[in-house]
Image (tube, helix red, strand yellow):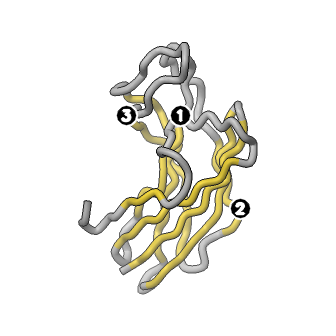
Amino acid sequence: MRRSLTIALLAGAAVTSQAHAQDSRQSRQFLRSTAPGQDVLVQHYGQWDQHCTPSGLPSVSVVTNPSHGSVSVRTGTEVVSNPPRVGATDCRGKTMPASLVWYTPAAGFKGRDSFVYEVHLPHGTLHDTAIVDVR
């Protein structure tokens, strides 16, 4: 997909919105592109139980701030696309509340920026890195 936003997963398995971290040190890296002055969605995180009932929003904290922009965490929704875990109801296609991680480049900045953040879930913590190309 090539527009003003390019999304690619650089490391790790399929992107998991449900994000039930099995390992408390699980980490992934995401590459995003945006135009100057344009916010870009880095990733979304939701949590729900085995019956597709939302179970609160994951908390997100920035560990290392970007050098040329800012990060915000917004409340929104996501449509579940993950296959169910063993023994769980198939939630695919359902809309769930989510914590959305956004990056906003500084005015006039063009180039590469990055930041590290943690997503705190009941079953562990994700340690994710975002790399954003502003072109």
Task: Say which label, 1 or 3, has the lower sequence index.
Answer: 1
Residue located at (55% from left, 64% from top): 130
Of the numbered discs in the image, which one, if any, rests on residue 79? Answer: 3
Query: Label 1 amino acid?
Result: Gln
Residue located at (42% from left, 86% from top): 108
- Disc 3 to disc 2, how far (Cα)? 27 Å
Query: Label 3 amino acid?
Result: Val
When the figure is inspected, residue 101 is found, relative to residue 48, above or below; the finding is below
User: What is the quadrant of the C terminus in the image?
Assistant: bottom left
Q: Quadrant of residue 123?
A: top right
Mark 1 touches mark 3? (CB < 8 Å) = no
- Disc 1 to disc 3, how far (Cα)? 10 Å
Residue located at (49% from left, 39% from top): 17
When the figure is inspected, residue 21 is found, relative to residue 52, above or below; the finding is below
Of the numbered discs in the image, which one, if any, rests on residue 42? Answer: none
User: What is the quadrant of the N terminus in the image?
Assistant: bottom left
The residue pinned by badge 1 equals 18
The residue pinned by badge 2 equals 63
Q: Position of residue 71 (x, y in %)?
A: 55, 63
- In the image, 28 versus 13, the foreground residue is 13
**Which residue is most to the right?**
24
- Disc 2 to disc 1, how far (Cα)? 21 Å
State left or right for residue 122 relative to residue 57: right
**Label 3 CA crowd tier, 10 Å (few <14, some 14–19, many 20+):** some
State left or right for residue 7 relative to residue 63: left
When the figure is inspected, residue 110 is found, relative to residue 75, above or below; the finding is below
Q: Position of residue 96 (x, y in %)?
A: 44, 29
- In the image, 2 versus 106, the foreground residue is 2
